[in-house]
Amino acid sequence: MVSRNLRLMVTSTLAAVLLLVTLFAACTPSQPAPAPAPAPAPAPAPYKWPNGFSVGSPSTTSAAYAAMAAWTAELENAVGVKARLVPEDNTQLQAQWLGKGEIDFMDQNETSMADIIAAINWRPEFQTRQGGPFELRRVGLRQPTWFVYFVAADTGIKTIKDIKPGLRMAQFTNNPHWAKALIALIGMKESDFKLIPYSSYPASVNAVKDGQADLSVVAPAASTAIQAEASKRGAVFLNLPTMAEDPAAIKRFSSLWAAPFGKVLSGAKSAIGVNTVQNSGGFWGTDKTSADLAYNILKWQDQNYAKFKDKTSETEYISMAFFRAYLDTAMVPTHPGAIKYMKEIGKWTPADDNRQKFNEWRLARYVEAYKKAIADADSKKIDVDPKNTAWLDLWKKYVDEVYKLPPFVIMSDSDIKDELAKIK
């Protein structure tokens, strides 16, 4: 009887507890069901590379051509895009092709490109109707180009201080500033030397090897430099002073050849370590180059450096480290696609923004001025021809007086700030 009553009491108590729980739940505000976990963002679609693109490059005998062929071959193997190289030593002609869209990219140092797009006064061959300034943009990695002055060893010259009047200088007519800048640096006059013109760069180098000249300038990584070093006459590569050692001489030099200096890192053995011109490299497109393509070329080069860095003597220097250094002295605008990648990896600075703004402004002014000068020439029946003095004088007037265009020279960050403050 007791156990039966106990069971009844337990059962009644449990029923009461369940009732209370039910009533409490009914009075408690209902809680929303937990939100489902967000679906993962879809992975971005892989970039679809074009079938191919064309690249204007220096001649097939150059170290630059070999380096370009090396990294583009790796790009083709990796993503399937075909890079068609168009070798041509006439840099002005190549620039015309790029400006008119007949090639997609161009491989050349920045100083040469700046001279071309400035249609610089002392380079009349750039001042053609088909040539002149256009909206050039730096896209990707490219090795620096060292240029070193050399003499035949049998001249007895060991340093630039040994250079005496009467020396025979080989002058590549496409780049006459090479000889002019050296003559200015050593404080002499052109009339002190015998300047021998050559229509091609290899010919101007081989002239020393073959005994037709005593001094020329060469890219030390080129086969012509190595051949000159091993020739019967031999070669002595001349060390140039630094700004700290002789600032007046360097300023005279830079007024004719606006290029930074650096020590040679590759090429002819006896040229290694020589202080000389180190032109900033450039893989160039235009403002019409696809931003996606520019972004992906630079990204691929940076992330796949290990695939091509050991392919030639020059490919080691097709690096982000050199690209970043170029930006510190850039005279030509950088492509927005390249800027996007540099920002992504944290290598674009406020100083770069200032430099980009100034470089875009300056180049746009040159483009506008050149169009106006040609229109003015046409209205005055002046033939736009680099052999026509009237046209050369008219363009010089537009540069110096009508537009007062600032030259393409290397500027510090503070110089850039000062120039930006003058722009209205």
Image (tube, helix red, strand yellow):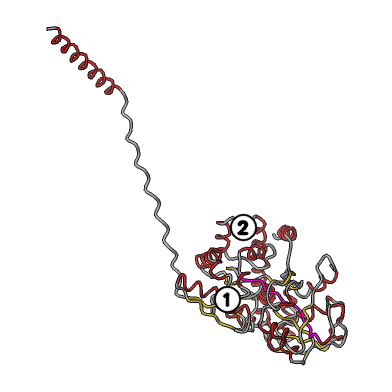
Kindly indicate the quadrant of the structure image that contains residue 185.
bottom right
In the rendering, at what x and y percent does residue 326 appear? 66, 65
Q: CB under 8 Å between callouts 2 and 1? A: no
Q: Which residue corresponds to mark 1?
A: 68
In the rendering, at what x and y percent does residue 112 appear? 68, 76
Quadrant holding the N terminus: top left
Q: Which mark is residue 201?
A: none
Q: Residues within 10 Å of mark 2 (few under 14, many from 20)?
A: some
Residue 148 lies within the magenta run: yes
Left or right: where does residue 217 sit relative to residue 364?
Answer: right
* Mark 2: secondary structure: loop
Kindly indicate the quadrant of the structure image that contains residue 269.
bottom right
The amino acid beneath tag 1 is Met
Front-lying residue, 92 or 305 = 305
Q: Is residue 424 above or below residue 392?
A: above
Q: Is residue 214 above or below residue 347?
A: below
| Earlier-in-chain disc, 2 versus 1 | 1
Q: Which residue corresponds to mark 2?
A: 348
Residue 163 lies within the magenta run: no
Q: Which residues are magenta?
A: 142-153
Mark-to-mark CA distance, 2 and 1: 25 Å
* Mark 1: secondary structure: helix
In the rendering, at what x and y percent does residue 173 appear? 72, 86
